[in-house]
Image (cartoon, rainbow, N blue to C red):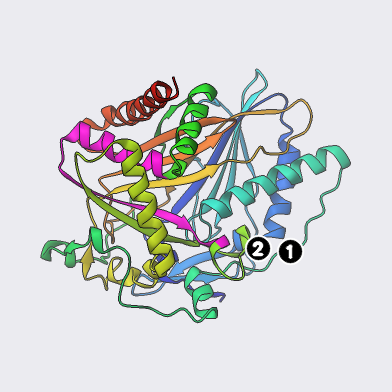
């Protein structure tokens, strides 16, 4: 056995949630070379070939792979514009990372790497994906891959304990808390059979490079963060579509660089605390709202409550929960995606984030009313959506309209 998973990791066990990084590539892709790169990745990061089993209480236990042979790269022919649920079995009881490659005759391909979310968050996944392309490029250019073995990543709870940080009175999530309904409190862990695998591919909208530059300039000129500006646009857009007066949002904050000493991307599993923000709508203009969001985050980081959120997870998740956070707006901003290193003649022209639940079961935690994903790739800001209710299709255009209005306002001020 490696260890029992901590609450920050446990929340992804019941659904067997794999987070995926998927790209389309132009040019000739050497499937055998990519297979060699993935095998090297599995050797370098042994957490990927570990497995998770559940005990009688539904708690996940991380196990060494034992004598189970690692599953290699899956290669097939098909439509690279689609992201498929692999026809082969994805089972966290066997392996925690899989690589799916779909080839097309016109020198286009899709490459999707799925990693179990219990052992890798956004920053960790991007690091693993970057290493995969490094190994692939090394293999094609030199015929050899040099990769040392990394230690198993650890949880945020473990890192906080090492630094003497204990649970305090505040979770930082107080703006979102509501009373847990009796119906939600019973049957949290049940013996219901697992359902078929389910793929969640967020709907996306892209800003071009010029529009993205305008958003960045707007944030710079108003002395607010891009995350604050986009989060403000999300809240204002959601309020405009649904006509709500009160909104609460939650968003992860990567704590790797905020811990002392800092932690490498691959050294932790899920190293994000949660920040919460609540407001009445309508409110001040988008820049003013972004500034209030930024001030709230700054204050919470200074008070140490962002890292406290994870120490309060048992109150909100799984069978021991006694609070509910359902109905909030979730915003995950993973920042700028690096330019992956690829051999000459190969171009990665698109990148997206997907999720796959290998055996979805009834939720044991509070779900968001809608989840927005935000990232920048090749100079283009992407905003994606999961869920959103009956008017979901209106949400992304409403958010972009808020950002466009911000740019128009800035242009008018500059003139």
Q: Is residue 109 above or below residue 337?
A: above
Residue at point 45%, 32% (across, down): 218
Q: Is residue 247 magenta?
A: yes
Q: Quadrant of residue 300?
A: bottom left
Q: Quadrant of residue 238?
A: top left
Q: Is residue 374 left or right of residue 365?
A: right
Q: Is residue 125 left or right of residue 184?
A: right
Q: Is residue 230 left or right of residue 69?
A: left
Q: Which residues are magenta?
A: 228-257
The residue carrying mark 2 is 46
Q: Is residue 37 magenta?
A: no
Q: Residues within 10 Å of mark 2 (few under 14, many from 20)?
A: some
Residue at point 43%, 63% (across, down): 301
Distance from label 1 to label 2 (Cα)?
7 Å
Q: Earlier in the sequence, mark 1 or mark 2?
A: 2
Q: Say the numbered circle drawn on residue 400.
A: none
Q: Position of residue 122 (x, y in %)?
A: 52, 51
CB of mark 1 within 8 Å of CB of mark 2?
A: yes
Q: Position of residue 72 (x, y in %)?
A: 65, 49
Q: Is residue 88 above or below residue 119?
A: above
For the image, the number of numbered tags is 2
The residue carrying mark 1 is 149
Residue at point 52%, 28% (across, down): 213
Quadrant that contains the C terminus? top left
């Amino acid at each position: 056995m490696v260890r029992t998973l901590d609450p920050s990791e446990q929340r992804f066990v019941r659904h067997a949630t794999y987070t995926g990084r998927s790209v389309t590539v132009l040019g000739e892709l050497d499937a055998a070379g990519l297979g060699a790169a993935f095998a090297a990745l599995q050797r370098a990061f042994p957490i990927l070939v570990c497995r998770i089993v559940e005990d009688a209480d539904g708690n996940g236990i991380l196990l060494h792979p034992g004598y189970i042979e690692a599953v290699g790269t899956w290669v097939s022919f098909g439509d690279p514009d689609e992201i498929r649920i692999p026809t082969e079995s994805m089972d966290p009881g066997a392996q925690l990372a899989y690589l799916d490659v779909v080839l097309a005759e016109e020198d286009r391909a899709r490459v999707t790497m799925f990693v179990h979310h219990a052992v890798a968050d956004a920053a960790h996944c991007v690091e693993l994906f970057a290493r995969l392309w490094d190994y692939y490029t090394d293999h094609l250019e030199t015929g050899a891959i040099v990769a040392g073995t990394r230690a198993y990543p650890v949880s945020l709870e473990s890192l906080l304990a090492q630094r003497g940080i204990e649970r305090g009175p505040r979770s930082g999530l107080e703006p979102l808390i509501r009373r847990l309904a009796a119906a939600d409190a019973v049957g949290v862990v049940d013996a219901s059979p697992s359902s078929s695998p389910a793929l969640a591919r967020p709907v996306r909208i892209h800003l071009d490079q010029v529009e993205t530059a305008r958003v960045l300039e707007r944030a710079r000129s108003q002395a607010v963060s891009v995350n604050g500006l986009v989060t403000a646009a999300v809240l204002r857009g959601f309020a405009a579509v649904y006509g709500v007066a009160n909104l609460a949002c939650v968003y992860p904050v990567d704590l790797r660089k905020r811990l002392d000493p800092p932690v490498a991307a691959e050294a932790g599993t899920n190293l994000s605390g949660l920040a919460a923000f609540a407001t009445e709508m309508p409110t001040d203009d988008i820049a003013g709202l972004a500034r209030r969001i930024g001030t709230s985050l700054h204050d919470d980081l200074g008070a140490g409550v962002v890292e406290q959120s994870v120490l309060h997870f048992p109150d909100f998740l799984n069978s021991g929960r006694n609070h509910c956070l359902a109905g909030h707006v979730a915003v995950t901003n993973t920042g700028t995606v690096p330019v992956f290193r690829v051999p000459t003649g190969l171009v990665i022209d698109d990148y997206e984030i997907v999720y796959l639940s290998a055996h979805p079961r009834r939720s044991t935690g509070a779900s968001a009313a809608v989840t927005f994903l935000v990232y920048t790739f090749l100079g283009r800001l992407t905003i994606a959506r999961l869920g959103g209710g009956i008017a979901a299709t209106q949400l992304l255009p409403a958010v972009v309209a808020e950002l466009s209005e911000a740019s128009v306002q800035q242009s008018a001020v500059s003139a």
